[in-house]
């Protein structure tokens, strides 16, 4: 007999007044996993598997922004079905193009190659009613690591992807991040969640 830990409990209805919009804003804030421990992540008491209410980095720490253009940067979350253990989700952010292939930037990219683990926060084009669902937080349990790298002369940029590492799988889809309201969340995002 298999054990079922959860059951569905709500209708999922299409809202004609709040249709989805494709894409993300082309800004990504990455936070070193070592700079944000689990005590710094405040989960919603009613929806702890899907909503983060606050992020408090360690003293003196800040996130780091990567900017993109057009709609090149995207995310994909895929089910990892497993016959021998719990199913999970692979979080991935793709199309991260680095438009400054200088030595300083290459040094940062080499840190990803060396095993840097990060959390990621991004803002979607679709923000939901009252902009309540604008931000997503990726990698809560395992962080993200570099999973793809291309350094080509065709367009002169470096392209990377960040994903759930190796055979790990997150237990849930990325959490929505909402600290009080959209304005408060946007301010924290714009300040790269700084605790300087």
Image: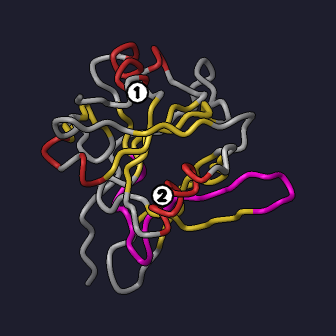
- Element type where label 2 sits in the image: strand
Along the line of sight, which residue is nearer the eye, 70 or 138?
A: 70
Q: Quadrant of the C terminus?
A: top left
Above or below, 68 relative to 102: above
Task: Report the residue marked by disc 2.
Answer: 91
Q: What is the CA distance from the residue labelled 2 to the residue labelled 1?
A: 20 Å
Q: Residues within 10 Å of mark 2 (few under 14, many from 20)?
A: many
Along the line of sight, which residue is nearer the eye, 8 or 155?
A: 155
Earlier residue among tags 2 and 1? 2
- Estimate the x, y position of residue 136 in percent, counting from the top left: 44, 39
Is residue 170 within the magenta segment? yes
- Element type where label 1 sits in the image: helix
Give the residues in magenta: 152-174
Type of secondary structure dominating the magenta stretch: loop
**On the picture, is 20 further left or further right than 174?**
right
Task: Report the residue marked by disc 1.
Answer: 189
Is residue 57 within the magenta segment? no
Residue 136 is tagged as none
Q: Residue furthest front?
A: 103
Q: Residues within 10 Å of mark 1 (few under 14, many from 20)?
A: many
Quarter where residue 29 is shown? top left
């Amino acid at each position: 007999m298999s054990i079922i830990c959860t059951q569905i409990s709500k209708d999922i209805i299409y809202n004609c007044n709040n249709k989805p919009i494709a894409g993300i804003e082309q800004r990504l804030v990455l936070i070193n996993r070592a700079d944000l421990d689990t005590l710094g992540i405040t989960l919603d008491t009613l929806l702890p598997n899907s909503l983060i209410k606050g992020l408090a980095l360690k003293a003196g720490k800040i996130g780091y922004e990567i900017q993109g253009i057009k709609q090149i940067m995207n995310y994909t979350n895929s089910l990892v079905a497993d016959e021998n253990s719990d199913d999970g989700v692979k979080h991935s952010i793709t199309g991260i193009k680095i438009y400054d292939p200088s030595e300083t930037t290459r040094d940062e990219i080499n840190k990803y190659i060396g095993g840097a683990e990060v959390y990621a926060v991004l803002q979607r084009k679709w923000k939901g009613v009252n902009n309540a669902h604008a931000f997503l937080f990726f990698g809560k349990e395992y962080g993200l690591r570099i999973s793809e790298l291309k350094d080509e002369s065709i367009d002169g940029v470096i392209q990377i992807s960040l994903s759930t590492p190796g055979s790990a799988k997150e237990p849930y889809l990325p959490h929505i991040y909402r600290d009080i309201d959209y304005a408060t969340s946007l301010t924290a995002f714009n300040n790269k969640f700084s605790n300087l």
